[in-house]
Image (cartoon, rainbow, N blue to C red):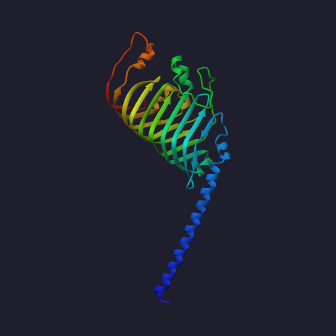
Amino acid sequence: MTTRGRASIGRSKRAGAARKVLVAFAGLLLVYVSLVNILINSDWFEELCNSRPGRVQVEWDSIWTWFPGHISLKNVRLRTQSLRVQSLVHAERASGWISFPSLRARTIRLFSVRITDLTSEVRSASMLRKAEPKEIRYFPVIPGFEPLTPESAREFGPFRPGWQVRISDAKVTGTHRLALGNYEISGTGTAFGEVSYRNHEKLEISGGSLSLSGTRVRVNGEELVSGVASGRFTVHEFEPYLHPGLAKAPFISFDLDIEGRLASLDVVNFYLGVERDSNWPGLSAGGGISGRLAVERG
């Protein structure tokens, strides 16, 4: 047999071995996808995620995976509750990668997270205690929980540190809406950032940036300003429980370019007690807003 013939046979054997490896890998991947998708769509997995329904409730319309460590969800809703705050986070679509080894260290590490159409609602006990009675009706009510009130019991530490959540390379696109007490901000665009949070301990958001159009700011249901905003933001490491309300401001930095208009002074009229059908029409104003808004640590 010639040297060329032996080389040809060697290449054929290597190609055959490569095909076998590829077929074996495809088979294992198919088994993984089938078994894991059956598992995460089972009642057992849903009950596991909702093992503490008085504090955490998770729902989704569909959940699936195609590769080890990657997960995708549609119409996912996360509700949380404590004596300090009730919250709802809803995303039309969400996907990302999870590091399984980090779970042994009580850390949920997510990366390459992609979220579409994000809504967040927060009902804070500290804000309720400072709010006027007529403001409270504009606070979001989180479904599934008895609403917090100014008379709700207070929660005191020290607390046992909970699980840590680390999210890197996060990108949110589509519509954004944040309802924080009687304040609401909404818009359409893109936001990036990296988040680190340990329950009952420290929160940090680094590398934050956003570009939003159709942005609207409402107070007590009344639109105050609308326009576009883009820039960077950072939440420096701090412990939220020890810094309620505006005490969080020294840990927040942002540098934004804004352009928009003043919608009305109905927010001011609300506090002046002007009714829409009263004889006095109240204050009115309008105009454009343009410039740069920069704040370093509050």
Image location of residue 153, percent across then percent down: 64, 23
Q: Which of 270 and 294 is in front in this view?
A: 270
Residue 132 seen by the camera: no
Left or right: residue 240 versus residue 259 is right
- Locate residue 88, reporting x and y percent: 55, 34
Residue at point 67%, 42% (across, down): 47
- Quadrant in which residue 58 is drawn: top right
Q: Which residue is drawn at 44% across and 31% down?
A: 185
In the rendered image, residue 80, in percent from the top left (x then y), is placed at 59, 34
Which residue, as the protein is rendered here, is positioned at the far front?
277
In this view of the protein, which residue sits in the foreground, 6 or 94?
94
For residue 140, which quarter of the picture?
Answer: top right
Seen from this angle, which residue lies furthest top?
279
Q: Would residue 14 be found to the left or right of residue 160 on screen?
A: left
On the rendered structure, is 109 left or right of 177?
Answer: right
> Image quadrant for the C terminus?
top left
Q: Where is residue 114 in the image (x, y as percent from the top left)?
A: 48, 46
- Judge whether 16 appears above or below 105 on screen: below
Horizontal arrangement in the rendering, residue 30 relative to residue 192 (left or right): right
As drawn, the residue found furthest toward the bottom would be 1
| Residue 53 visible to the viewer | yes
Q: How many labels does the image show?
A: 0
